[in-house]
Amino acid sequence: MQQRRTIDQIHTNRVLLNGQLDTPKWWAPTVITLGIIVAIGFFLIGIMVNKGLGVTGLSRPVYWGLFITTFVFWVGISHAGIMISAILRLSQAEWRRPVTRAAELLTVFSLLTALMFPLMHAGRPWRIIYYIVPYDFARGIMPNVRSPLIWDPVAISTYLTGSTLFLYIALLPDLGNLRDRTTGWQKAFYTILALGWRGNPRQWKLQTVGGILLSALMLPIFVSVHSIVSWDFAVTPAVEGWHSTIFAPYFVIGAVHSGVSAVVTMMALMRWLWKWEDFIRPEHFDALARLLIVVATGWLAFTFLELIFAVYGLDAPEIELRDMQIFQWPWNLLFVVFVFTGYIIPVGMWLQKSVRNNIALMFWSSLFVNIGMWLERFMIIVPGLARKTPFVYTWEAYRPSGLEWFILFWSLAWVTFLMLLFSRFFPLVPLFEQKESQTFGDSIKIGRARVPAIVREAD
Amino acid sequence: MTLQREKRDYSWGMVVDVDKCTGCQACVLACQAENNVPLNLQDRFERARAMQWIRVERYWEGEFPDIKARFIPIMCQHCENAPCEPVCPVFATYHNNEGLNVQVYNRCVGTRYCANGCPYIVRFFNYWEPVWPEAFRNHLNPDVTVRSRGIMEKCSFCVQRIRRGVRNAERDGRKVQDGEIQTACTQACPTDALVFGNFNDKDSRVSKMKDDDRHYTLLPHLATDPNVVYLAQIDTDRSAGSSHG
């Protein structure tokens, strides 16, 4: 499956550090354009905080809409990091190596973005600090720990802290590398960040142990974060489509589906933009696509189980909800787009070996997945609220306002902006991982036999 | 923790006799005036953001000409087991020791989670800062907070009237008499379809009415244990549709 390629270390250094030492020409104009979109987005959020949430399309009873959808979407994307860098690391999947950092980075930035949505979505965001930080012991009003909205920031900030540490530990050897290749203020910058990394055996050992420990410690987060996000919905008995026991595993597997697909999208972009054809190879796409076929099919099973449970109960409001989701305009159009982009088109494509090894097709199919996964969250959140009880008197529709749409696109621009900004100062493909995998692959000839040059030390 | 119903001094509740309701909306108007609820202009209804702490739902039954209009007033049910309470991250809504589901405006950060949790859809969000015409400036009730934008509000069982009634009774060293405290809606109801009182007082009107054969609560399968009890409509003319309260 994977061809063995030999890339010497000088070539690795030269090519993978091109973002820092030899910034591509497209970088500055792209970052400036994205920066303008980001600035407009922040301005609109400012308007929303200043004027009130009336500027959105929310109503009664559709109190949550596009913002919460986008929040769940970004938390879902963040599962990329833990899947690639923790699970694949612990299972010693060699092909993960070039994408570990980019995936972890995507996790950090998408979590930062996700956290902003519930904040800006609150009626009085300036008072939110009251519930994230326990306050005012004198009056004895602590945050209500029974609320999933308390569990959310706890889970997400744990994940964010773990991921940031993980990212930084994996960055140390490359920071040392950059420090040795830069001058002036850049050298000072990298010297401080590299924490005196010299690459001696003790430092390597600590770095490896730290990475493995963090992977293992973060494994529970793999299950907990999106389970907790799903409980935001699943604990409300009032909303027909939300109050479901399968939500936690359903959301987790959906998150892996969208997160790993986002990694594929990003890998294709990295390969094209920084010309890293030697490092991000078709076999990496092939491996991820095989993984995705399994994940996507598991996720599809949950999607249909949810519908089957609904129909099996013959509960009138629930039937009405599913009828709206699947058969009523415009939800029927969204449903078809969701099923096709979320599963049928991409998985149909990935079953072909020629597609799995074609970067452009993998790029588009992974984009499709995330369109479908965003729609999935939208189709869970909004119809559930619009048809939430038997009180037909208060059935309402929801039409997101232009401002909400812009802020959705702002979030995409914002994550891309942060990633590009990062790429200017730090390598997106870990150099040491690349070299390590080369060394692990080296073999020497003893007599007629070829044996590995390095024996992996038992962890 | 909240006291059990039996251990409280007062356990406020309401009985709604649907049979007597004519759908006149007097309760809606009285509530609006008493509780400084912002004016529901046309665009508020069009955007589905109108605020009515008590609303009269109208359902049509049967086909013309054998058609009946059914009315049911719905306000906050002040559930003993309220789904809105545990989901609030800041304790802005909680159950007090008189059976009221109270909303603390100062704590509310506007997550709207309580509104999602409420199966009766009786919680309202202030999407905009409330504005009254100049002529209404001096008509606001000084006993009731004017809610700012970004927070939730809902029927409080006219808690300002309850407080005044209890205070007066305590001053005189007695308990509140039945009928002494009236909410704005019960006071305005011309047919006496809405009755407010203390469920813990065995002799109160609501205690006697709530055990009527016609009694039911809304969405009982959700086990919210509401403090608002409905009395079903009696259909004398069975020809038009079936009767199911």
Image (spheres, grey):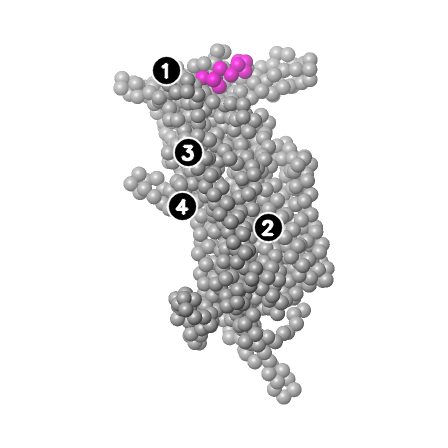
Q: Is residue A342 above or below residue A329?
A: below
Q: Which residue is mark 3?
A: B93
Q: Which residue is mark 1?
A: B180
Question: In terms of secondary structure, where does tag 2 sit?
Answer: helix
- Residue A112 pos. (x, y %): 48, 51
Q: For the residues carrying marks 4 and 3, which lies nearer the camera in this image?
A: 4
Residue positioned 66% across, 15% down in the render: B67
Q: Is residue A366 magenta?
A: no
Identity, as a three-letter code, of the amino acid under mark 1: Glu
Question: In terms of secondary structure, where does tag 4 sit?
Answer: helix
Residue positioned 41% across, 31% down in the render: B148
Span of residues in magenta: B20-30
Callout 4 and callout 3 share a chain: no
Identity, as a three-letter code, of the amino acid under mark 3: Thr
Q: Using a 10 Å C-alpha cutoff, classify the residue at mark 1 as few (fewer than 14 neighbours), some (14 to 19) or many (20 or more).
A: few
- Which chain letter matches label 1? B
Real-space CA distance between mark 2 and mark 3, rounded to the nearest whole angstrom: 33 Å
Q: Is residue A85 above or below residue A385?
A: below
- Residue A59 pos. (x, y %): 53, 32
Q: Which residue is mark 2?
A: A254
Q: Quadrant of the N terminus of chain A?
A: bottom right
Residue positioned 57% across, 59% down in the render: A26
Identity, as a three-letter code, of the amino acid under mark 2: Gly
Q: Is residue A119 above or below residue B180?
A: below
Which quadrant would residue A57 be assigned to in this image?
Answer: top right
Q: Which residue is mark 4?
A: A132
